[in-house]
Amino acid sequence: MAEYKFHILVCGGTGCRSSKSEDISKALWDAIMDAGMQNDCKVLMTGCFGFCEKGPVVKILPDNTFYTQVTPEDAKEIVAEHIVKGRKVERLLFTDPETKEQVTDAKHMEFYQKQMRVVLRNCGFIDPENIDEYIARDGYQGLAKAITEMTPEEVIEEVKKSGLRGRGGAGFPTGMKWQFARGYAGDEKYVVCNADEGDPGAFMDRSVLEGDPNSIIEAMAICGYAIGSSMGRVYIRAEYPLAIKRLTIAIEQARDYGLLGENILGTDFSFDIELMYGAGAFVCGEETALIHSMEGKRGEPTTKPPFPAEAGFWGKPTNVNNVETFANIPVIFLKGADWFKSIGTEKSPGTKVFALAGKINNVGLIEVPMGTTLREVIYEIGGGIKNGKKFKAVQTGGPSGGCLTEKDLDVAIDFDSLIERGSMMGSGGMIVMDEDDCMPAVAKFYLEFTQEESCGKCTPCRVGTTRLSELLTDITEGRGTLEHIDELKRLAGVIKDTALCGLGQTAPNPVLSTLKSFENEYRAHVVDKKCPACRCQALLNFEIDPALCKGCTLCARNCPANAITGTVKEPHVIDQSKCIKCGACMENCRFNAISKR
């Protein structure tokens, strides 16, 4: 195998690919060829590096130089300076926003320093379309150990000992789930990977599948051996084309290497995997709805029991875990359950991957040990709030979660602590909000999503979420009353207690959590008919300060409703009865004379 002086790693995740990382890779290789360095350099398209805010990202090994916001036009300079002359291209290095110093090595970037990459261990380091690179990083050793040195019962005990809990949101002990599936008899059993990631702003599972698909294949095979299954299914949403492509390549390569199919590694164990595509229904993240969709039926949940472990896909015993849960399995068998349990907290061992988004400086994919605080995530890894604004809230758990405030910043991130605070871990979405966000409007956004995604099977969810959304619309559009707030509280409680599945039961969480911490904002909307954050358009008033207005007429000329009057060089006035709240006047004013209230 050829040895290279330099490995140039180009982020090939969906985010960076949308910013021309494929063109960057080609341009780098062309520059290398022009320089005659093709025998010294290898260019790799990897999975997501995580630092999405500064993508596209290019990393050069062995010195670990980290270049940000690279363009195809930068390729020649990178090769000419860094590869040929050994000089870093300083303008492409990351500049620490606090110290204003350039950081040459990714290990010294605050974004990465508090992270611990277990699930993401290979993302950004290997070519996900080359199984040899996965194997070179100890890939498939966990599978080999499990099927050649351990009994299925011992495999399950190892998973139970690790304390791994499901990362799809519910946090159910994974080893116990496997034990249930093994305990039920069936002429066929199924291992299902839930890759139906539907939370707004979430891209954790997609990134794992794009950057390290073999880890999921290996984990599913270990699970198959443990529960007595020979068939695996990955249920993945069809709008993840890159993840599908790389997973398909990985499955084919694993078959070629004898790591999938008949008599794996010369043993009596046989296991294979097929892909099944979802159409993007959020409710299909619930395991019974997912199974119905796999069977070609409507994606609707059913009451449990029976649980899928007893009667799942085609009525056979079925084990369902999500992508992130499976991604932990190979490491547990490689390094041991005790090692895994030493990370995180007693009741929530291991790490958690989050998609950190919203009003945060360092938007990206992060992985931290359980027990890390929200403050550490937001202010150290995330780099604080954008534009120097004040932190207001963070939504964890996506539309099923709740908003946590400044008083919650020092809470440890784990399954139980977040639930105690009225939120939840969920699959890992984490959206940060600042002082300019309106909390009733935030609740309305999430309710509109869950209402749209409700399968409609049960009345509390079908009708209840619609009514909640209508109440929030009335409040944010100025038609709300104090009775509306009381109705929100009552109806939210009824839905939580009576909805059929987790989607409906958790749908009121954004409403209840924002009411708990920001009821004053709701009251301002219904009593004062004002939006304190100035975000609800129907409640806005644009006003001209006569002391600042120069009478340039620019606002009047840009007002589509002809609501502004005044003469040249004299203060202008807005007729509130005609104003349509579009904000065009404020956008065009050169003297900051117009404000919204």
Image: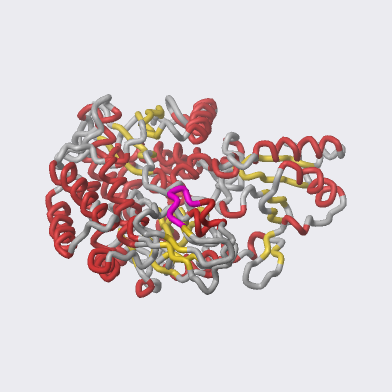
Magenta stretch: helix, strand or loop mostly: loop
At a point 31% along the width and 49% down the height, the residue shown is 174
Quarter that holds the C terminus: bottom left
User: For residue 277: magenta?
Assistant: no
Image position, residue 489 (x, y; %): 17, 61
Quarter that holds the N terminus: top right
The residue closer to the viewer here, 159 or 107, is 107
Work out whether 597 lies above or below 147. Answer: below
Q: In the picture provided, is 68 more to the left or to the right than 227?
A: right
Q: In the picture provided, is 579 more to the left or to the right than 55?
A: left
Image position, residue 317 (x, y; %): 23, 34
Q: In the picture provided, is 66 more to the left or to the right than 482?
A: right
At a point 34% along the width and 42% down the height, the residue shown is 151
Q: In the picture provided, is 232 more to the left or to the right than 180?
A: right
Q: Quadrant of residue 253?
A: top right
The residue closer to the viewer here, 130 or 76, is 76
Look at the image and give the residue range highlighted in magenta: 559-564
At a point 49% along the width and 33% down the height, the residue shown is 247
At a point 17% along the width and 65% down the height, the residue shown is 482
The residue closer to the viewer here, 418 or 142, is 418
